[in-house]
Amino acid sequence: MLTVRVAMLAGLGASLAVPVLAQTNLASQAAPRPSQTIAFFERAKIGPLEVTPIGVIRDQRCSDPRFCYRPQDMRVSVIVYADGIMQEAVLRLGIPTKVPGGYLTLVDPGTRPRDRGALRLDEYRLDIRYAPAIERDR
């Protein structure tokens, strides 16, 4: 957001007021973002909701899709806070999930899959996107 600041310049024995455009960071006053990257157990505002990822239910992504015989699937459990009400939702990778007022979609888990062994939760950086419901969905 751009704001106008006034810079005082001293010159020729008098002070001049000159408007200067400056970029101001108003993150605390900014509108909620429709997409956010979140770590597990971190609470973040996405659209009008607050979301906290709490666990991986399933991560069946293939590290090399050329040799993958199963469908790519990832499911994450999140707590959604909307209008003072808390509820659990399960987000599937790339599939919108109905939540109060719209849809949440797990866009990207933020980490590559592995052939062997589990990923630690702190390796994930979940990209979750909010889309408001259209009138016919309400």
Image: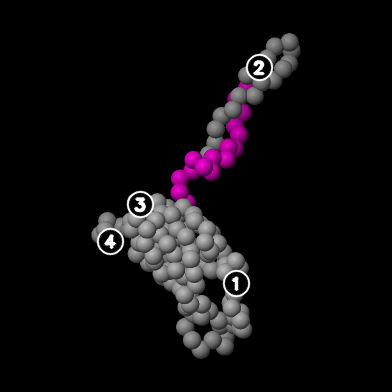
Magenta-drawn segment: 18-33
Indicate yes or no whether the magenta region holds residue 137: no
Instruction: Check disc 2 and report the residue beneath it.
Output: 16
Q: CA distance from mark 2 to mark 4?
A: 57 Å
Local SS, label 4: helix
Instruction: Check disc 1 and report the residue beneath it.
Output: 120
Q: Which mark is residue 27?
A: none
Q: Is residue 87 visible?
A: yes
Q: Amino acid at mark 3?
A: Gly
Q: Amino acid at mark 2?
A: Leu
Q: CA distance from mark 4 to mark 1?
A: 37 Å
Q: CA distance from mark 3 to mark 2?
A: 52 Å
Local SS, label 3: loop
Instruction: Check disc 4 and report the residue beneath it.
Output: 137
Q: Pointer 2 and pointer 4: residues touching (CB < 8 Å)?
A: no
Q: CA distance from mark 3 to mark 1?
A: 31 Å
Disc 2 or 4, which lies upstream in sequence? 2
* Residue 16 in the image, given as x and y percentages of width and height: 66, 16
Indicate yes or no whether the magenta region holds residue 30: yes
Local SS, label 1: loop
